[in-house]
Amino acid sequence: MPVNVVSTIKGLCKRCFSCIRHCPAKAIKVEDGQATVVWEYCIGCGHCVQVCSQNAKIILSGIEKAEQALKTEKPIACLAPSFVAQYSQYHPGQVISAVKKLGFTEVWEVAFGAYLVTQAYQKHVLSDQEKPYYISTSCPAIINMVEKHYPEFIPYLVPIVSPMIALGRYLKKTFGDRCRVVFIGPCVAKKDEAEDVRKLLTFPEESAGGIMNTEFVSLPVDLTAGQAITRIRETANDAETIYYLYVTDESDHLLGVFSLRQLVMANPKSHIKDFMETHLITVDLTDNQDHCAQIISKYNLLAVPVVDKNNVLHGIVTADDALDKIIPTAWKKRLPKLYH
Ligand code: SF4
Ligand code: SF4
């Protein structure tokens, strides 16, 4: 689920509305006298933090988590290329030595991830020339803008991970899946992106955990159909798919699933527990992607939930994602339009 990377410190806001005027995504509303960020619309550009003269806007800090990792693990640091400009008074080698002194075992530059991504872009554009244009960006704020405000352009986003994620995956492959990676950089929107991919980087790229999407709709079991529809309207903006709605308990254990069709057809006063499917078809976080594709195809599903050994729901693998990994591009072109 998405995290609020920018928020308002209650009590400091003097209602000058400067942030509201400057927000490019119209993502700030006045609530209880405070200019409050609405994360469903916020793209994480961080502009409101700069324009607020009262220091009432804050950015989510990752320092505590990094300090914890330094105490208990031997993390690897990944430096955003901007470190050279930020610490221009020092030689880059001095900055790298200083980061190592903090306790990081390795220091890598995210620029290497950019090198990996460039190669993937070249391959993709050469092998898929059907679209008239592509949106090529590694900026998560731009991607948020497209996904949240211009969803009609989503098909034109090149489906290749950012340099940060490419490097994270490379490091996991090189140093083992259990190595801890800490990204150090100035980008606000990257914090949201990092939260989303944290789980994905924990698992091998070829596993269900490595290809799953963490933006899905989960609902508590005690809702009525009418309440569920209201909840979906309020929270499902970022969900990858709402064809399936997942029912979980307070600890995220998967209890049931039902389709959007079932929900719409149900009496608004009926309880979702009365019509949800409890004979669940799931895949494990560590199952390989071929298995996911087989399950999806065998049961004719649009997506399959990904759970751990304790039946805790972590994400979903959609039919597109599963097939995308196992079907060569040349074959995909021969498939019906439904796939594209
Ligand atoms: S710019 Fe700062 S003080 Fe002004 S409305 Fe926004 S949060 Fe409040
Ligand atoms: S971070 Fe950007 S998009 Fe989000 S509320 Fe602030 S100005 Fe608006």
Image: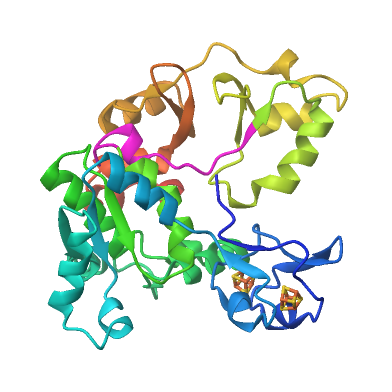
Region in magenta: 203-218
**According to the image, what is the colour scheme of the structure?**
rainbow
Q: Is residue 69 magenta?
A: no
Q: Nearer the viewer, residue 275 or 180?
A: 180
Is residue 316 rendered to the left or right of residue 15?
left
How far across and down, in percent of the image, does residue 273 sit?
A: 72, 16
How far across and down, in percent of the image, does residue 128 sit?
A: 28, 64
Residue at the image point whose x is 51% and y is 16% from the top? 280
Q: Which of 5 and 208 is in front in this view?
A: 5
Q: Which of 6 and 316 is in front in this view?
A: 6
Where 192 falls versus 286 (above or below)? Answer: below
How far across and down, in percent of the image, does residue 10 sit?
A: 75, 61
**Quadrant in which residue 83 is drawn:** bottom left
| Quadrant of the drawing holding the N terminus | top right
Where 54 falls versus 319 (above or below)? Answer: below
**Quadrant in which residue 213 is drawn:** top left
Is residue 119 rendered to the left or right of residue 291?
left
Residue at the image point whose x is 46% and y is 61% from the top? 155
Residue at the image point whose x is 23% and y is 50% from the top? 169
Residue 160 can be seen in this image:
no
Is residue 239 rendered to the left or right of residue 212?
right
Residue at the image point whose x is 35% and y is 42% from the top? 200
Number of marks in picture: 0
Q: Is residue 208 magenta?
A: yes
Residue 221 can be seen in this image:
yes
